[in-house]
Image (cartoon, rainbow, N blue to C red):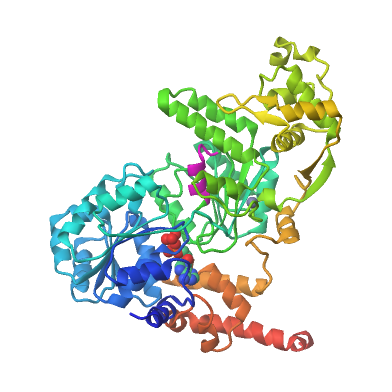
Amino acid sequence: MTTTDVHVLLKRHFGYDQFRPGQEEIISNALAGRNSLVVMPTGGGKSLCYQLPALATGGVTLVISPLIALMKDQVDGLRANGIAADFLNSTLDNRTAAEVERGAQAGSVRLLYAAPERVSMPGFRRFLGTLDLRLIAIDEAHCISEWGHDFRPDYRALSELRALFPQTPVMALTATATGRVQQDIVEQLRLDDCRRFVSGFDRPNLTYRVEPGAGAWDALLDLLEERKGQSAIVYCFSRKDTEDLAAKLSSHGHPAVAYHAGLNANTRRLTQERFIDGEVPIVAATIAFGMGIDKPDIRLVVHHTLPKSIEGYYQETGRAGRDGLPSECVLFFNEGDRAKQEYFIQGMTGEARAVAERQLQQMVDYCRLSACRRRYLLQYFGETATAEACGNCDTCLAQRQAVDVTVVAQKLLSAVIRTGERFGFAHVGNVLLGKNLKRIRELEHDKLTVFGIVDDYDRDGLRRVADGLVERGLLAKAEGQYPTVGVTKSGREWLRNHETLTLDLRVDERPPQGRHSKVRQSNGGGTAAPNTGYDDVLFEQLRALRRRLADEEGVPAFVVFGDATLRGLAEAKPVTPEDMLRVSGVGPAKLERYGEAFLAVTRVTKEQTMHPKADHNR
Ligand code: ADP
Ligand code: ZN
């Protein structure tokens, strides 16, 4: 296989012009007959890494995937690209399964998907022995490790595959694996002399935002309004919350359904299918929703409640924008949500409790960050972000203004000192704001001279000033369970010297209406650039056409074309089949199948843009 050959296959079968980072190397490693471990973030393009070799080598590539619900979509997607693929799992009756097996034996199937539990069945093993097996791909490979977050006993059987097919290279793939889990995968699968391909965790097309929980409802409506008809997940605290929110959203013109573990299996499956097919755009869900949602065009993931850990949060937000297009992750943060979580933590004991407390604290720290959120997330996963600021999270996108905070900073530092440097910021803030609270009275902090001396800042504003003082090294936060604040040596010096102090504070905290798009455009530094190149109206027409074709064929909309391809079409406005073939995501198979239908729409728009007058005269 030469490089030109794989490029030809890339265009011919997938319609793409370029490989994503890492893909080409991984593919050539497999084609050279070597084992690989691939760790790539969600949406990085893992599937192509084994799908393309399957076309290049001939024979059969076995794909082990735990998500039975997804197999059909994956196979439909491949077939739409003219690739012979099939699957074997418990949803098939015996006759169909036998047919699929015969097809694989006859060599008329390139990719065969199967669930892991099959591998321990003697009949299935015998069947595999009759195939011309060229590659074994193991998706969600972290499921084999007990150290991972999703251990599945069925995966253990896969360790025998190497013994059964010592000559066949294996490719293990996962989106989440710490070093320990990677090692475990390699050992369990006995992937001797395996090459590891580990790409970073960063998801540059995702915008991260944290917004105050107090205005969540209005802000949520704004967000959904901006993305009308596009797919969104809203994570809620309880089962009841999901139902209440789904009903409320639906009655406000945003069709939504609820999803949680308390619904029966059939309802859950149906809801999932309707969401994947694009029939219902919004799901209000508990964290039970998501595993097995391999939908590329989710544009928005909202956390209406505080997640329990950064891992969980990252995994949930990771479901947005798998197709690489700009997508948004918004977390509404309420101090009160923390108390809800703490209530549950109090019921735990020992190590588990300590872990839960630490995770919650990290999550709260993330919410209160005044520095780049992406940087925090990447550091959490052990990666050092190169840039101070990513340009694509709310703190990086925020407008900042130099504000003279001399007076309020003096008040803050004095209050910290007067209360004995034994309290967290929440208490100090309450004292400064003069809150009538039992705790304050008990401590007699209402008798202090600093009680109630701030009226030009609210609590959030005070917190931002305090964060600024921490960054400047005037205040210090103690580590540990009770993060008390104290005044540093330079803080005391600053107070003595009566110096002025200016901080760059965020000013666009809560501008009304449509702020998201505005903020993005005014900065535009990130990857989530606003739409410039393509025709919005045409895009919507193409979307409607895609919906119709998908319904006719009974497949999810993205099987026809992904959003990225629709945008490409709305930009290029192809007139001839050759024009259309130049758009990324259009290969010969899809051109033949859908070309005429889409060209009929793009041609009309092209003519209108070329002869705009003609339209007015009519
Ligand atoms: P993962 O399994 O890593 O989460 P997928 O394999 O589902 O990611 O790929 C994510 C999306 O990226 C899919 O819509 C896929 O078609 C697209 N994709 C993959 N490789 C390329 C490429 N080389 N060029 C353009 N799009 C690609
Ligand atoms: Zn940032």
Residue at the spot 68% in from the left edge and 64% down from the top edge: 530
Check residue 308 for magenta coloring: yes
Q: Position of residue 584 (x, y in %)?
A: 52, 76
Which contiguous range is marked in magenta?
Answer: 307-317
- Decide: is 456 above or below 329: above
Of residue 374 and residue 572, the one placed in the foreground of this image is: 374
Residue at the spot 70% in from the left edge and 84% down from the top edge: 609
Of residue 571 and residue 249, the one placed in the foreground of this image is: 571
Of residue 391 and residue 319, the one placed in the foreground of this image is: 391
Residue at the spot 65% in from the left edge and 41% down from the top edge: 369
| Main SS, magenta residues | helix
Q: Position of residue 102 (x, y in %)?
A: 18, 71
Q: Position of residue 139 (x, y in %)?
A: 34, 57
- Decide: is 24 above or below 410: below
Of residue 533 and residue 547, the one placed in the foreground of this image is: 533
Q: Is residue 544 visible?
A: no
Q: Is residue 264 left or right of residue 20?
A: left
Quarter of the figure that contains the C terminus: bottom right
Q: Is residue 136 left or right of residue 369?
A: left
Check residue 278 for magenta coloring: no
Q: Position of residue 169 (x, y in %)?
A: 25, 65
Residue 433 quadrant: top right
Q: Is residue 10 visible?
A: yes
Residue at the spot 31% in from the left edge and 68% down from the top edge: 30
Quarter of the figure that contains the N terminus: bottom left
